[in-house]
Image (cartoon, helix red, strand yellow):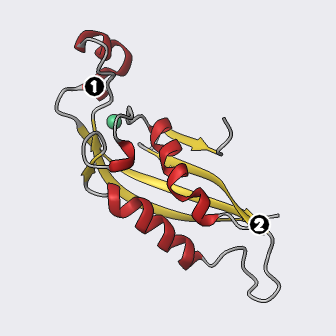
Amino acid sequence: MVYITRRFNFSASHRVYNPSLSDEENFKIYGKCSNPNGHGHNYIMDVTVAGEVDSKTGFVMDLSELKGIVTSSIIKKVDHRNLNTDVDFMNGVLPSTENIAIKFWEQIEKKINTDKRKLHSIKIQETVNNSVEYNGKK
Ligand code: NI
């Protein structure tokens, strides 16, 4: 099994809050991330695919194909957008990095997986110190 990874960058804003809680409770849980007017991050995302090396191409997956899938399914929809209000597949989802990783996974898994290769992980870095990794298992 060989693992290949492509890195993506996007900038997006969000407000991390649970609408069923008061502003005070939200601030207790999410701190300044729940500030009413939102804030932005320059996210870094690593998408990893695991598979067999194809004997003809020498690739697990053509990285330009991976780039195309992730760009059209995710990056074009989220870059320079508000994750609370502007992204169809984030509708009603609390935009924590954990939930962002899960929803991103759902957008690309079926487009990547074949008999020979599987989406292995999505790692999203929100800040230099904070990142989340999801591998699709509940
Ligand atoms: Ni934030």
* Image spot of residue 133 (x, y percent): 59, 43
Residue 3 relative to residue 65: left or right: right
User: Are the residues at dot 1 and dot 2 in contact (C-beta closer than 8 Å)?
Assistant: no
Kindly report which numbered mark, 1 or 2, lies closer to the viewer in this rendering.
Answer: 2
Q: Is residue 57 above or below residue 42?
A: below
Q: Secondary structure at mark 1?
A: helix
Question: How many circles with numbers are drawn on the protein?
Answer: 2
Residue 16 relative to residue 73: left or right: left
Q: Is residue 83 above or below residue 15?
A: below
> What residue is rendered at 38% in x and 36% in y?
95
> What residue is rendered at 76% in x and 83% in y?
58
The foreground one among 6 and 107 is 107
Q: Which mark is residue 51?
A: 2
> What residue is rendered at 33% in x and 58% in y?
77
Q: Secondary structure at mark 2?
A: strand
Q: Which mark is residue 34?
A: 1
